[in-house]
Image: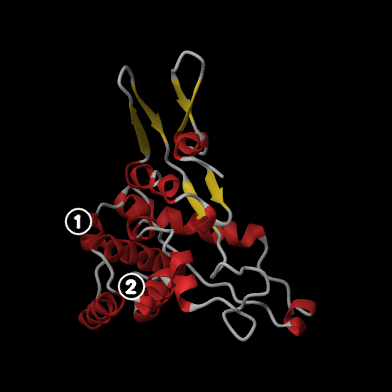
Amino acid sequence: MVTPVALYLVYDSGSRPKPGEISLAHNGILFLDELAEFDRKALDVLREPLETGRISISRAARQAEFPARFQLVAAMNPCPQGYDCDLGPHCRCTPEQRRRHRGRISAPLLDRIDLSIEVPRLPRDVLMDPGPPPESTEQVRSRVAACRDRQLARQGKLNAALSGREAEGICTLAPAHQQLLETAMDRFRLSARAYHRILRVARTLADMDGAPRIEAHHLMEALSYRAMDRWRASEA
């Protein structure tokens, strides 16, 4: 189990802070498997660096600041049972057990996660016969590079780096699409932080398509990547 201290710093014999896991992942990926099994205090340590890209450590005699701009990737089971669970007939967990399991991840941390999706169990026939091969890495890389170029040409930074005010100015929606987003905000009780993150994701999806503006299907897809918000709203 990763403790809060191990996540952001370690101490040597002289009590001097050194970079921990999130600073070692700077400009890279921090992957946390079985996210709900981490101590909640350890997970909440991630909130500051996910927002600012830095981590500040204050102790009685010393203060230190480390870079921590990383991409967080995490995986978790939908309930405590885990194995053989598809939230269907095989699941033996009670609704209360599921709520406690998912409740180990705080709402403020969820707000800082742009994409959360459910990965259902694949049917046996699909698993054994996956069909035609997917896009190659080179093809995907080319599309992503073109998307990045569009963002840099338009605003001089990536969509992920847009402030809330900048996102409102650049990720504009048609009136009907704005109403759709407002309805989703009310239904799933989304925060202002989630609102801006949805706008940035929708703008990125439009950039991937080379579209000049955010269309309805871009916004709908961005909203579909809020699976954990839907869980939270359904259990409230």
Q: Which of 204 and 87 is in front in this view?
A: 87
Which residue is pictured at 32% across the width and 71% down the height? Answer: 213
Residue 168, picture quadrant = bottom left
Q: Is residue 229 left or right of residue 34?
A: left
Point out which mark residue 60 bears: none
Kind of residue at badge 1:
Arg
Q: Is residue 49 above or below residue 92?
A: above
The quadrant the C terminus occupies is: bottom left
The quadrant the N terminus occupies is: top right
Q: Nearer the viewer, residue 210 or 22?
A: 22
Kind of residue at badge 2:
Ile
Furthest residue in direction top, as rendered: 14
Q: Where does residue 10 sit, x and y in percent of width and height?
A: 49, 27
Residue 125, picture quadrant = bottom right
Which residue is pictured at 31% across the width and 17% down the height? Answer: 61
- Residue pointed to by mark 2: 214
Tell me, what colour scheme is on the image? Answer: secondary structure
Q: Where does residue 38 sit, x and y in percent of width and height?
A: 51, 51
Q: Which of marks 1 and 2 is in front?
A: 1
Q: Which of 130 and 205 is in front in this view?
A: 130
